Amino acid sequence: MSKKLFEINPDLDRKALAEQFAVNGRLQIRDVLTRETAEEIRMILAQQTPWGMAMKAGSDNPTGADQIRAQDLKTPVGQQKVQQLAQASHEAAAKGDYAFRYAHYSLVEAYLEKWNPGGPHDLILEYLNAPDFIQLARDATGIEELIKADGQATLYAAQHFLSQHTDSHVAEGWRVAYVMNFAIDDWKPDWGGYLNFYDDEGDIVQGFRPRFNALNLFAVPQAHAVSYVPPFAPAGRFAITGWFRDQ
């Protein structure tokens, strides 16, 4: 593993980024890391991550939400649960209710529960919370109160999606949501996986393509979604996602 994992691009114009964020509370920072370190993180996500599943079916149905770890996916009971939750999330989305389905690996749980102490995923979480990266978030958003970041590795593959919601957990310290993309370089628009933002009438007012080595930042609450990845998409959208927090 490179000793320079998570090296921030030194050429970022932080003043210009802050001016862009101030317009509507969101921006995409391209080439946020050096190319070498970004490629290493993509390799970790693609080759060294034991993916579980995260699913939810309905905002008022707590039994329709679950996280299934990688080891459980290998069991008959786990497979049956995945199938049931996948169908439930499909039905909830069809009714216009809140639902999601994507592969994930919790960086925070892995760190606290010592799934692989000192492994690459622990290092990624530590770099997310390193002073220089937290300062980048402060500089780009103008929010000096940011003190830490949580995070999960995510993979949006075929038939995965995240329906429209707002991330209204301000009382829990959520201030700025982030999506750090490590998709393949030539991601096609027809493959979905876009981070879309909506106005009060449901129109898309801005969308960010899954662009390799790009960091999306947006203030919460703000209506957004990740668009459906169709079955013909030849690759999944790798990313690290979470929230910068003030507590």
Image (cartoon, helix red, strand yellow):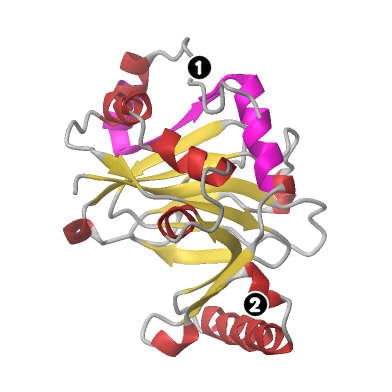
Disc 2: which residue: 72
As for residue 38 lying within the magenta part, the answer is yes
Q: Is residue 76 left or right of residue 148?
A: right
Q: Could you say which quadrant of the image residue 214 lies in?
A: top right
Q: Secondary structure at mark 2?
A: helix
Using the image, tell me which numbered label, if any, was put on residue 96.
none
Which comes before the other along the chain, label 1 or label 2?
Answer: 1
> Is the residue under label 2 in contact with that under label 1 (CB below 8 Å)?
no
Regarding residue 160, the answer to whether it shows in the image is yes
Which residues make up the magenta segment? 19-45
Q: Position of residue 204 (x, y in %)?
A: 47, 52
Q: Is residue 206 left or right of residue 136?
A: right
Q: Tag 2: residue type?
A: Asp
Q: CA distance from mark 1 to mark 2?
A: 38 Å
The residue nearer to you, when weighing 49 against 191, is: 49
Q: Is residue 164 above or below residue 191?
A: below
Q: Give me the residue at 25% from left, 61% from top.
A: 169
Main secondary structure found in the magenta portion: helix
Disc 1: which residue: 9
Q: Secondary structure at mark 1?
A: loop
Instruction: Determine crowd level at label 1: few under 14, some 14-19, many 20+ residues with C-alpha closer than 10 A.
Output: some
Instruction: Determine crowd level at label 2: few under 14, some 14-19, many 20+ residues with C-alpha closer than 10 A.
Output: some
Q: Tag 1: residue type?
A: Asn
Look at the image and tell me in which quarter the N terminus lies: top right
Q: Is residue 185 above or below residue 31?
A: below
Q: Give me the residue at 54% from left, 78% from top.
A: 93
Q: Is residue 162 left or right of residue 244?
A: right
Q: Is residue 90 above or below residue 122?
A: below
Q: Position of residue 246 (x, y in %)?
A: 20, 45
The residue nearer to you, when weighing 238 against 217, is: 238
